[in-house]
Amino acid sequence: MRYVKASRAQITSCFALLLLGCGGAAAAPDESLELIETEGLAEHIRVLASDEFEGRAPASEGERLTVEYLSDAFANLGLRPGNGDAWVQPVPLVAITADPNMTLLVEGDDGDRSLSYEEDFMVWTKRVIDRSSLDDSELVFVGYGIVAPEYGWDDYAGVDVTGKTVVVLVNDPGYATGDEALFNGHAMTYYGRWTYKFEEAARQGAAGALIIHDTGPAGYPWEVVTGSWSGRQFGLVADDANLSRVAVEGWLQLDVARDLFELADLDMASLMEDATEPDFEPVPMQIAATLEIRNKVERSVSNNVAAWIEGSERPDEFIVFMAHWDHLGRDETLEGDQIYNGALDNATGTAGLLEIAEAFAALDPPPARSVLFLAVTAEEKGLLGSEYYGEHPLQPLENTVAAINMDGLNTIGPVHDITVIGLGNSELDDYLEQAATAQNRVVRADPEAEKGFFYRSDHFNFAKKGVPALYTDRGMDHIEFGEEYGRRMSEEYTAERYHKPSDEWDESWDLDGAVDDLRLLFEIGYRLAGEDVWPNWREGNEFRAARDVMMGASR
């Protein structure tokens, strides 16, 4: 169902006439669509990805220049500051660096194991304190560590893990079994993400949470674990200094986990099989962990940048367009090029945000609903700017109709298709299908849905609060050179430029495909901003309940 103030007959008519416009939302005017063009897009990308901006790291000179550029651009378009009289929303950050000189000691009746940092395990703490530890904390295997009422699933049923350390499998039972009727089948759900595992362990009162790494269901090798979770770890700081988090979060290398199950006289393979059943019961392992993490704590402040256009009829209802402005900054230890310019990731998306803002600013009159343009910080540090917005929204989330995210645009030219990360999740797919059809294009699902990309970009922090979110990716089927060319270009970028100093502006880029995508997203936002319909998540989606509660409370 959709939340709506119109009659059922009006809703039916709305769907039937969507391409022609409904609920006050006619097709977007050509003069606005034409303002989204390659020249302006290219200029924004060149500036944001220039060496002068030093890779746009949070809390750096590059941030100052970026925030100033975005604020000036929004102001020049005649938009209103998004945070009262300010263009920025300050985001307090903390960087915690764990001393790698640590050992994880696991003891049981039949012996003990002394495990090595990085080789055997990776741990950290989100608690903003100098030291965090486990002291003879009993290990409990809790399967996938999932509590999902909509799936009739509770891996913590009948066990009290207060003060204990839970051992958890990565991904979810749908991936493990390949059963399309279980969770979301091969495609990962939110319950499969490592972020959820740690959050649920904290809700259950655990002292620690250790995820068993397995390359297939994780979607990346152990080297990504060691590289991603060593060194400075950025995060947000809650009012309780994050003491509500478990004391120790981390990963166990797969073979090490097998050895610990043997130490506990347990058959890990058999228990993994048991964990794919809804009647799985947690298993106390009768072994205990001891560990101390010593931290260096550094605090800083970065900024989200926000601007908005006030709606002409329902100004308290918002459509959000978003992109992350940050990248990895500068690494002075590198020889030669030290700047991670982040041209595609995500100067393109940020430039696209400005192009769409220009198109909306030109509308006369403005659409019925308001439109918020949000350039968030610290995506590369763990989606932190958007997470902070989700916890401290500038506009109430119950008044937020939808969020549309742009993270890396098409630089290879026009394509026949567009990829949706999370296709089938929400009724926003209907809008996308209509807009794509109008461009004589087709919608394709994420070919690697098992890797959980839907949960790895900024729209996710709107989704988990209940706000329907749309995240598209570049299509593959190039109009002139075909699908193999598009796939090869994508693989080449990932191998040679992704998160490397070589992700720089390239004069050979063909931005016509990016313009097609931006006009498509503008069309979707324009229709949403002109309607009085409230799209929802599909039945059975893990975020549906949050939206239902939100809308029930506000309407």
Image: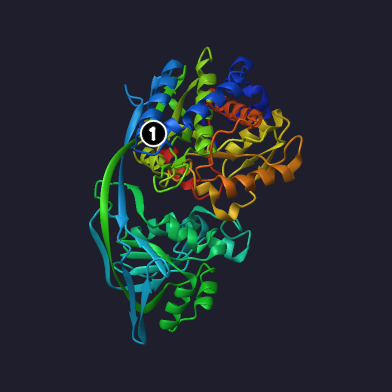
445 horizontally vs 49: left or right: right
* Quarter of the image where one finds residue 373: top left
Residue 286, placed above or below residue 221: below
Name the residue nearer the viewer: 299 or 397: 299
Q: Which quadrant holds the N terminus?
A: top right
Disc 1 on helix, strand or loop? helix
Name the residue nearer the viewer: 544 or 382: 382
Residue at point 49%, 53% (across, down): 190
Image coords of residue 439 (percent x, y) = 70, 29
Image coords of residue 119 (percent x, y) = 43, 69
289 horizontally vs 129: left or right: right
Image coords of residue 65 (percent x, y) = 38, 28
Q: How many tags in the picture?
A: 1
Residue where numbered disc 1 is placed: 62
Residue 150, placed above or below residue 488: below
Name the residue nearer the viewer: 361 or 482: 482
